Image: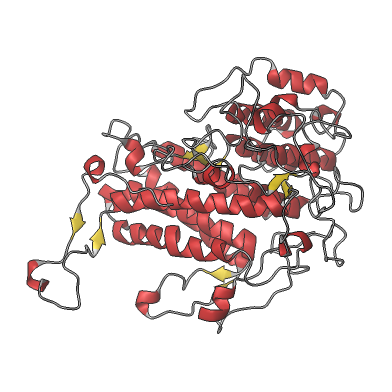
Amino acid sequence: MNLKISAGVLSILLIASSCNDFLDINENPNSPITADVQLVLPQAIVASANIASQFNNYGAHFGGFMANAGGFSGFGNLLSYNLTAGDYNGLWVNTYQDPLQDLKYVIDKTEGVDALSYFNAAAKIMTVVNYQRLVDAFGNIPYTQALRGSEGITAPVYDDAATVYTSLIAKLDEAIDLIDNAQFPLSLKNATDSRAYDPLFKGEILDWKRYANTLKLRMFIRTGNAAGVASIDLGVGFLTSDAVVNPGYEKNRPNPTWNAWGRSTTDALSNSSRIPTSFAFAFYGGTGSKISDTGRGESIYVDFPATPTNQLGNEVNNPTIIAGKVTWASTDPGLLGTGVLKGPAMGSPLMLKAEANFLIAEAQLRGYLAGGVPEMTKSFYKGIKSSYAYLYQDESGAMKDTTGRVATYITVNAGNRLVEIEQAATTDERLEAIITQKYIAMNMITSDEAWNEYRRTGFPVSIPGGGARVDIASNKSTITSRPDRMPTRAMYPSSEQSFNAKNYVSIDFRSDRIFWDPN
């Protein structure tokens, strides 16, 4: 879904064919050949949010958040992990065709133009967001020759994934330099409708710099680059709020994640074939739970704690959804419209403040940022608090009462080192607590990032064959070469076999790892 922004709001300038070329039969005089960047950038940001929703779906399955419900068959490759080149084509094709193509256009049109440097910086940051997703899912990807069909490059080579990461960090530095030397107001919030041209940060350019810093922190931590973290300008720091895209979603133009797992524009249930995994649900409560978390459980799940759950792959007497109800939507009377699926008008998160807090905590734990264990502990609890804060907002952004919720959570789980991090005695145990809490915070929000972190760290801990509440893998997994029975990555899409056969590489999803994955 692409939301078109009102031309009246933006004073859009469309440059059409000149009168001298009107009779050129090879050109359509009614179609503009150049669009104003003020129109293209917001559409690219919204398209990036749409793709983020698709990556969330992919991560929800592989990351252990979502399982098959009863009454359905034909899940096939999803349950066996017997992946094919046809799986997850959309992640690749849609990312290149929509946001990345538009973002390249914005960058090309604004490079070196001081008056448009806001758009150039934002487009570069969003370009990094999209390319990093592709690297983390597929590894080596077309980058230096990508999107250059107009130059005759129709079969782009695949760049080394680690080199792409380095280039993306350089692109973030370019954006930050533009912001530091801005030729425009740092805040454009007094514009007629800042959301129309900036549906992410609504005209606050320093929030874009904080986002860039946080993306750099994520990549440096993922690659173990202590010197990179030390190079980050901490003047404005990292995200101080959730990075959420909202161009004006509403019932007839709904948030893409709500549209996928909530209700359609006619109020029909969008999903009746998926329910939460027993593995993920065990972080909230129930028999054999790893953590008790009534506060977040009530905001996320239907009829919590009586929410139906399943082990991925179990097709024998597995539960169905609760008829007529959205599975990932609260039915608690005081929390209606909060949680993961708040409603059609909710924003689309690209990165949560909670993730930023947990990244900072890990950097402090590893000595990449100053503060050591005392500051790490503070950042850890800030991450939990930020997770609660996001979930307790409704679709309009209004906050439900969270008084005492975080304190109660810590008290109820006293002695559990996954919650009370002071009980963790080693660096590895502290890292387990940080990544486990990050996993909980990303549940059905940015699930692909949770999946990335599981592959990087091995947390949350999974016990193969240990039972539904502790085994992240499908019980029908065909992968025997890895102890956790999980795939290592997505395969290159079949579209590349068709259109870029010269550079297409056949990989083994059971053993070929993304460059940052040590497991």
Residue ID at (63%, 59%): 136
Q: Residue 466 in the image: x percent, y percent?
A: 92, 48
- Rendering quarter of residue 434: top right
Q: Nearer the viewer, residue 148 or 373?
A: 148
Q: Within the image, what quadrant is residue 15 found in? A: bottom left
Looking at the picture, the colour scheme in use is secondary structure
Q: Whole-percent x and y of residue 50?
A: 49, 51
Position of 23 with respect to 426 (left or right) is: left
Could one spot residue 232 in this view of the protein?
A: no
Give me the residue at 61% from left, 19% from top.
334
Residue farthest to the bottom, as pictured:
502
Outermost top residue: 403
Give the vertical position of 204 relative to 143 (above or below). above
The front one of 10 and 105 is: 10
Q: Residue furthest right?
A: 466
Q: Quadrant of residue 380?
A: top right
All told, the count of numbered labels is 0
Position of 113 with respect to 465 (left or right) is: left
Please give left or right for residue 298 compared with residue 132 in the image: right
Residue for point 78% across, 35% down: 283
Image coordinates for residue 169, horizontal then vertical, percent? 53, 55
The residue located at (77%, 31%) in the rendering is: 306
Work out whether residue 25 can be spotted.
yes
Q: Look at the picture and state if 408 lies above or below 62.
A: above
Quarter of the image with the C terminus in it: bottom right
